[in-house]
Image: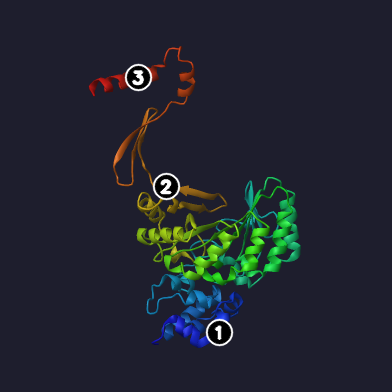
Amino acid sequence: MGESIRERILDLLRPTPAEWADWKWHFRHRITTAEALARIVPIAPDAVSRLAAVATKFPLSITPYYLALVRDGDPDDPILQQSMPDPRETALADLGEDDPLEESADSPVPGLVHRYPDRALLVVTDICPLLCRHCTRKREWEFGNWVRRPSEIDAAVEYLRATPTIRDVIISGGDPLTLDNARLGDLLARLRSIPHLEIIRFGTRFPVVLPQRIDAEFCRLCDRYGPIWLNTHFNHPNEITPEAERAVRELLRAGVPVNNQTVLLRGINDTVEIQRRLSRELLRIRVRPYYLYHADEVRGTEHLRTPVERGLEILEGLRGHTSGLGVPTFVIDVPGGGGKIPLLPNYVVSWTDEELTVRNYEGLTFRYRNPADDAADRASTAASPPSPRLARRRQRSDTARKRS
C-alpha cells in the first residue's frame, strides 16, 4: 500500500468534492467492519479476525473524514487508537461496569438523567458517527441504533416543565447531531417554551469527527433558540483541522460558545507535551479547554485508563507554562452517581490561621498572610482594643519595619 490513508479512502469510495463536503455522505459510508477497515489501514490478516471478534461485542464505526486523519504506517496513531477495536476490550471486560455512573438510577423518566439540582441530561439517541473506544455509554452499543421515541421525548419534556429547579439541560446521546435539523428544531422549540429553562447545551463530537455536520441551517437553529452552548470532545491536537476550525467559527458566529471536554487516554494524550499542544491549539481556534476527564470505569475501556496521578502531573505541567485560559479542570466522575469531583495538585505546603506557605509552578515556596475572618469588622471599630491575635501581628510587623 503505497498510497496515504486519505488517498486509499478516495480511491475506494470515489466521492465527488460535493459528496466529501456532505456530512450525510460520510455518515452513510462509515467503516463498520474489520474487513472494510483492513482495505484502508494496514492490518495483519490474522489480526483482522481478532478485531472482528471484538466488534461482535463492541461494534465499529468510523467516518471516512476521521479515518483520513490517520498517519499511515503508525500503529500508535491517536486517531486509530480511539476508533479501532482492540482485543483488550474483551480480554479486560471483567474490569469496570456497564453503567458505573449509575445514570439509570437518576433517570425519573427514560432518557432523562437528573443528578444535579439545577440541570438535567437528555439522551435522545445512541447513534454516533464514530464509536469511540473509551465511550462512557458503551453499554448502549449492543442494543443497536435507536432514536428516542416521541412518547419518551414527551415524558422528558413534561418532567422538565414540571421541575422549575432545572434551569439547564444538556442534549446528549450517542450524538444528538445525528438527528436531522428538522427534528432538532422541534426539540429546541419545545425546550425553549419552558420558562425556567435558561440554558440549552449540546454534547456532540461532530465538530471533531465530522465537522461538515455544522451547516448553516443548524447554526440558524442555534441562533434562533439561544442561548445555546456546545461541548465537544477534542482529545488530540491532530484532530484540529481546517475543517474543524471552520465548524467552530460558524458556531461562534451563531453565538454558540464552544467548550472542550478531553478524556485522558493511555498512550493517546497522557503526556504534558500533548496536552499543552492541545490546549494551545484549542485556544487558537477559540475553543475553551473546559474539562480534562479521567476515563470512567466503563467495561471494555480499561486498557485506555491511566492512573489518576497522571492527570495531576499533566495539570501541574500546564499551570504556569501556558495561559490560564488553557488549563482545564481535571475531574473524576465517581461511581455510584456521586458526580464530578475536581482534583488539583497540592500547592499548599503548610497552612495556619495566620499564614500559608505555598509553592508555585517552578517549585519555589512563598509565605502568604492569611487575613483574619473578622479583620474588616475590627477595622470599623478601631476604638476597640485589638484582639490578642491582631496585637501579635502588629508587633511582628513593627519589629520587621525596625529591622529593615
Q: Is residue 258 left or right of residue 317?
A: right
Query: Where the N terminus falls, by quadrant?
Result: bottom left
Kindly identify which residue carries mark 3: 394
Q: Mark 1 or mark 2: which comes first in sequence?
A: 1
Picture quadrant where residue 181 is located: bottom right
Residue 344, numbered circle: 2
Spatial separation of the CA atoms under disc 1 and disc 2: 49 Å
Which residue is the site of mark 1? 16
Name the secondary structure under disc 1: loop
Cα gap from disc 3 to disc 1, whole angstroms: 79 Å
Is residue 249 shown left or right of residue 42?
Answer: right
Labels 2 and 3: the sequence-earlier one: 2
Residue at (59, 70) in percent of width and height: 213
What secondary structure is marked by label 2?
loop
**Closer to the camera, 163 or 240?**
240
- Please state the horizontal and vertical placement of residue 352, each as a whole percent of the image: 38, 30
- Give the residue drawn at x 52%, y 53%: 333
- Reply above or below: 85 against 388: below
Q: Amino acid at mark 1?
A: Thr
Could you say where residue 166 lies in the image, as x and y percent from the top left?
67, 48
Spatial CA span between label 2 and label 3: 34 Å
Q: Residues within 10 Å of mark 3 (few under 14, many from 20)?
A: few
